Amino acid sequence: MSERLQCHIYIVDDETHNLTLLSKLLTRHGFHQVTTNSDPEDALIQIPRSNCDLLLMDMSMPKMSGLELLENLQPLVHGTPPLPVLVLTGDTRTDTRRAALNLGAKDFVNKPFDPPEVLCRIQNLLESRCLQRRLLNQNSELERLVHERTRQLQLNQLETVRRLGQAAEYRDDQTGTHIVRVSQAAGRLARALGQSEDFISAIGHAAQLHDLGKLAIPDSILLKPGRLTDEEMQAMRQHVALGAQILAGSECPILSMAEQIARYHHERWDGKGYLEGLEGLQIPLCARILSVVDVFDALTSERPYKRAWTHAEALAEIEKGRGTQFDPDLVDEFLRVAEDIYQIKPLTV
Ligand SMILES: [Fe+2]
């Protein structure tokens, strides 16, 4: 059955012989969903519930005029796509026709009507109704596809970030758990600081790449079990510049933030950090956050040259760096939420 013949046609006319005539005409031409109503007041209640595709209506009716019915139906007539209205009228006055057009009528048929003409006009209106509906369906399908592809692209991007972070991590921590802990803690500290959801999400991903530059540090330095010489330390410090170089120039917000984090996460609040010696608020917030959570994680992790510090010892060390190594406000917030972040007892001072 054609799409047009499946349409639901609603007819309102106080003259029942017109309803019978139109109903028979339509069913004879294959329309199966035809509803008739001789009471415009009842029609006003029934039409919005009927999910009809076309409204045929008389203009002069005793209880409620066609114009009144149209006016009351306006919210429905102007839906998406708007319900087409075909007016059957003996009234040929221009004013009445204009008023009906302004209220959403799409076409007119003069009474007494010529059945083939009515049928033709009905088919035209239904044809454009079906086209509009198809277009709307296509649009929403396209929107769904674009949404799905965008989501997929974002997921792919995040997966690439995660794998890249892991690649750097495997160079000096086979477990790969340091970046997971650091990025989670960075996100939670950002949330505690009242940052936007976009910032929180971005830092949670970008933080994974903070030590990406370690990929370019020779094994002899990176994996050296003992203390580094001054020269080796200098080479090691280059991991911030190398990481930033790898990430530079991206239009992706996560990678741009990752570049800032990679470049500045070893800067200090007092300006004695590396590589550029930025101080205070010159250091981007994302890097200041990372500096705190990265040091805390390093302190509480075991290294070939040191035992893992207890949470209390590490928190005390972070507090010691308040205003020298770290942003003082950020340290305050960190100490306040550390219990939550790491599920530990807060520092008692
Ligand atoms: Fe680092």
Image: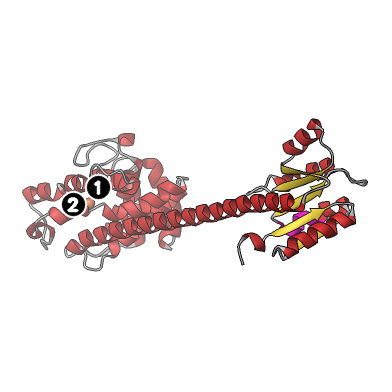
Q: Which residue is mark 2?
A: 213
- The yes-or-no answer for disc 2 within 8 Å of ligand 1 is yes
Q: How would you rate the neighbour count of disc 1 (Cα within 10 Å): few for under 14, some for 14-19, many for 20 or more? A: many
Q: Which residue is mark 1?
A: 262
Residue 208 appearing in the image: yes
Viewer-proximal residue, 335 or 75? 75
* 231 sits left or right of 318 in the view: left
Viewer-proximal residue, 45 or 146? 45
Classify mark 1: helix, strand or loop: helix
Residue type indicated by callout 2: Gly
Q: Position of residue 44 (x, y in %)?
A: 82, 51
Q: Is residue 70 magenta?
A: no
Majority secondary structure of the magenta segment?
helix
Q: Marks 1 and 2, Cα distance to the nearest angstrom? A: 8 Å
Q: How would you rate the neighbour count of disc 2 (Cα within 10 Å): few for under 14, some for 14-19, many for 20 or more? A: many
Viewer-proximal residue, 33 or 260? 33
* 70 sits left or right of 338 in the view: right
Q: Earlier in the sequence, mark 1 or mark 2?
A: 2
| Residue for point 19% across, 48% down | 246
Residue type indicated by callout 1: Ala
* The magenta segment: 46-52
Q: Position of residue 147 (x, y in %)?
A: 45, 54
Residue 346 appearing in the image: no
Q: Are marks 1 and 2 in contact (CB under 8 Å)?
A: yes
